[in-house]
Image (tube, rainbow, N blue to C red):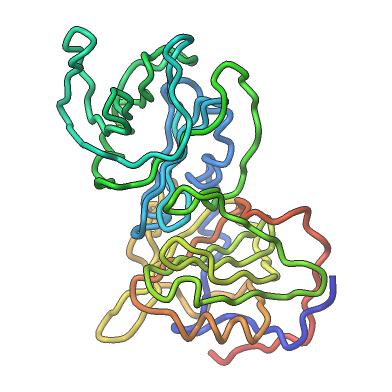
Amino acid sequence: MRGLNRAALLASSVGLLALWPPLASAQGAKASSPPEFARRIEHLKPGEWVWAPGVSPSGPVVIYVDLSRQIGIVYRNGVRIAATTVSSGKSGHATPTGVFTILQKDAKHRSSTYNNAPMPYQQRLTWDGVALHAGGLPGYPESHGCVHLPYGFAKELFAITKLGVTVVVAGDAESHVRTSDNSLLAPFDGKGKPVDRTPLAGGEQYRWRPQLAPSGPLSIIVSKLDQRVVVLRGGVEIGRSVAEVNDDDPGSHVITMALREGKPRWIYIGLPGHAEDEGREVDEAVINRLRLPRPFYEKVRAVLTPGTTILVTNSRVGEGPLEHLTVIDAVKPLP
């Protein structure tokens, strides 16, 4: 890949980071934080789930149920925040596939068809009986058409959804085709249409299309694995860039822009496994580990507002095999 002409290091409190803590603070970590764990969703055991709402605190919610893998994934603002095992309809009562919306919510619902059976945290998808709700999870399809969720997961999901949220149900429960979707980005948009995550091609260094989503919450993903940065607004990808990310911390970190004493500051959000991060202000003295093309950096910097969230992760953002990347002519920012 061509070198990046006029690339810039990111720094300063209104730049795009000093995101990383000193390496010493990450030593001794025994487990990956949720984004890393959730990208290995095919290894979740029946009843297991991962919930990391701090990865993307606001924005539109999309739920994706993969019948082939018996997995459910929740995205907020286009970023995956949760993954769970599910149990869908058994033979003769197959869960229908398609794009649905949540029609009704009832935390204490009971079935009018099956002996008044409890269906906690029910979220109805069809008026003839298909819904998301807490239920049995034996590790295979066993329901009468609904999508069973772990009780704790169903409760958390119920709290962040509203009527009209899109639910995409795809796959074939009987074929058990196991695929791998390691990307943190939603495969469907808020209307249930597949999202084209076109990678940067040839000598293309970045893409910037803010007109695709003029308003909405801003999320920025820094993928150490793909060496890419992706910008989402209102759940829509508006920017993507090559990057050089020099960091050997295997975990994830999330920061958000907040106002302190009337000035914008980057503040860490404490993900599970990184509780020590909570509320800590990003230290500008931390050595910067990210380089981006200068034009892309300037465009992103111009749209940053309080509430912007940045996720630094080892998970993928939908790029193909990574080519070797060399960043040249980098400019060191002033402290």
Left or right, 163 with reference to 281: left
Is there any visible trace of residue 272 in the rendered image?
no
Q: Position of residue 202 (x, y in %)?
A: 82, 69
Label count reads: 0
**In which quadrant of the rendered view does residue 84 lie?**
top left
Residue at 40%, 47% in the rendered image? 52
Q: Position of residue 134 (x, y in %)?
A: 29, 24
Residue at 29%, 47% in the rendered image? 164
209, above or below 224, in the image: below
- Most distant residue in the bottom direction: 334
Q: Position of residue 311 (x, y in %)?
A: 49, 61
Q: Position of residue 265 (x, y in %)?
A: 37, 78
53, above or below 119, in the image: below
Residue at 77%, 85% in the rendered image? 5
Residue at 40%, 71% in the rendered image? 308
The N terminus appears in which quarter of the rendering?
bottom right
- Most distant residue in the front direction: 128
Is there any visible trace of residue 279 in the rendered image?
yes
212, above or below 105, in the image: below
139, above or below 202, in the image: above
Instruction: Give 94 or 69, whichever is nearer the viewer.
Output: 94
**In which quadrant of the rendered view does residue 243 lie?**
bottom right
**In which quadrant of the rendered view does residue 198 lie?**
bottom right
